[in-house]
Amino acid sequence: MEKEKLLERIEVNPKVMAGKPVIKGTRLTVHYILSLLASGMTIEEILDEYEGLEREDILACIAFASEALERTEFVPLMAEAI
């Protein structure tokens, strides 16, 4: 599925979860799904845990994070000399 189509599954609405990005029609935030993946859960385990969630929803969370990082600038932190 194209990235643009995946991203349509994510919404940012100030009335839902205080405006955090969520999977449309749910209260599952992108951050929460990414945290589950980072903790070692597989896509299949997440799908088993949350009825109605689709594989593309999880891929949409990954795509959203990728886009967010692409648009973010990082400044390396330098240690100060003591």
Image: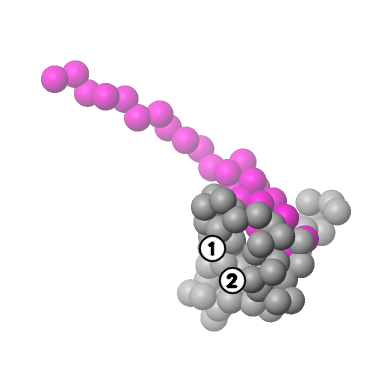
Give the Cα separation between the discs numbered 2 and 1: 7 Å
- Asked whether residue 7 appears in the rendered view, the answer is no
- Identify the residue shown where x is 72% and y is 55%: 59
Q: Secondary structure at mark 2?
A: loop
Q: Position of residue 35 (x, y in %)?
A: 52, 56
The type of residue carrying mark 2 is Leu
**Which range of residues does the magenta coloring cover?**
56-82
Q: Is residue 4 above or below residue 8?
A: above
- Identify the residue shown where x is 42% and y is 32%: 75
Q: Secondary structure at mark 1?
A: helix
The foreground one among 26 and 72 is 26
Query: Is 17 positioned to the left or the right of 24 in the image?
Result: left
The foreground one among 35 and 24 is 35
- Asked whether residue 54 appears in the rendered view, the answer is yes
2 and 1 marks in contact (CB < 8 Å): yes
Q: Is residue 27 above or below residue 82?
A: below
Residue holding disc 1: 32
Q: Position of residue 24 (x, y in %)?
A: 69, 73
Q: Dividing the image into 4 quarters, which one contains the C terminus?
A: top left
Residue holding disc 2: 28
